[in-house]
Each structure stands twice: as C-alpha cells, then as structure tokens.
Amino acid sequence: MTRLGLGCLQVLYDENIDNILDARTINELLRTTCLYKSFDYQKLYRTLNDLYDEGYVDKGAKNGKAMTYYLTKSGKALIKEFC
C-alpha cells in the first residue's frame, strides 16, 4: 500500500463511492480536486488496479468503454483504521 493508494481510497470513502451504481471512471475521479494534483491517468490506472488486486476496490459496470471503480468493505475498513 502506498500513500497515493491511501489517498485514492480516502477520496472514494469521502465521496461515498461504495457500490456498483456509484462507481466512477478514472476520468471522473481525476476531476476530484485531491486526485488531479497527485495523479495523471496512467498513475491512477495503475494505483486502482493495484488496489483492485489487493481487494480494496472493485470494478463496477462499464461506462461506455471505460471501467468504473468503487470502494469495497475491506477498503472502507482500512480507511477507518487509518483515520
């Protein structure tokens, strides 16, 4: 887990993005003030996929061709542990 990964989880938690219907694309997440300063598209893509592999985020329904992401219960538990 990296500091950028924790920051990404924090944004998903703060924005209440925790189910398939609320899932966001990478471009939608980049519009968030906290993320656009720390990430470019590729870095956020890699970070989200690392978080997915660790089970902290899951992939939601596609939005056109873009994959969407949301926070899992284990991701919420991790953020609550650190905050």
Image (cartoon, rainbow, N blue to C red):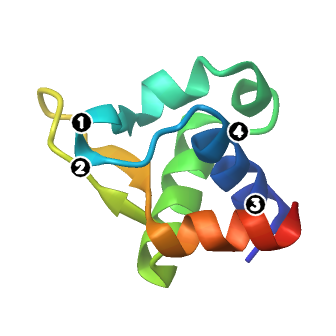
| Disc 4/disc 3 C-alpha distance (Å) | 13 Å
Residue 18 vs 31, above or below: the answer is: below
Frontmost residue, 16 versus 43: 16
Residue 50 appears in view? no
Question: Pointers 1 and 2 in contact (CB under 8 A)?
Answer: yes
Image quadrant where residue 30 sits: top right
The kind of residue on which mark 2 rests is: Gly
Q: How many marks?
A: 4
- Tell me which residue sits at (12%, 27%) in the image: 64
Name the N-terminal-most of marks 2 and 4. Answer: 4
Q: Answer yes or no: do the residues labelled 3 and 2 have beta carbons within 8 Å?
A: no
Q: Secondary structure at mark 4?
A: loop
**Residue 21 circle label:** 1
Q: Earlier in the sequence, mark 4 or mark 3?
A: 3
SS of the residue under disc 3: helix
Dot 2: few (<14), some (14–19), or many (≥20) neighbours within 10 Å? some
Choose mark 2 or mark 4, whichever is in front: 2
User: Looking at the image, do the residues carrying marks 3 and 1 touch, with CB atoms under 8 Å apart?
Assistant: no
Q: Nearer the viewer, mark 4 or mark 3?
A: 3
* Viewer-side residue, 38 vs 22: 22
- In percent of width and height, residue 4 lies at 78, 56
Circle 4 is placed at which residue position? 39
CA gap, disc 1 and disc 2: 8 Å
Numbered label attached to residue 60: 2
Residue 9 appears in the figure: yes
- Residues 1 and 73: in front is 73
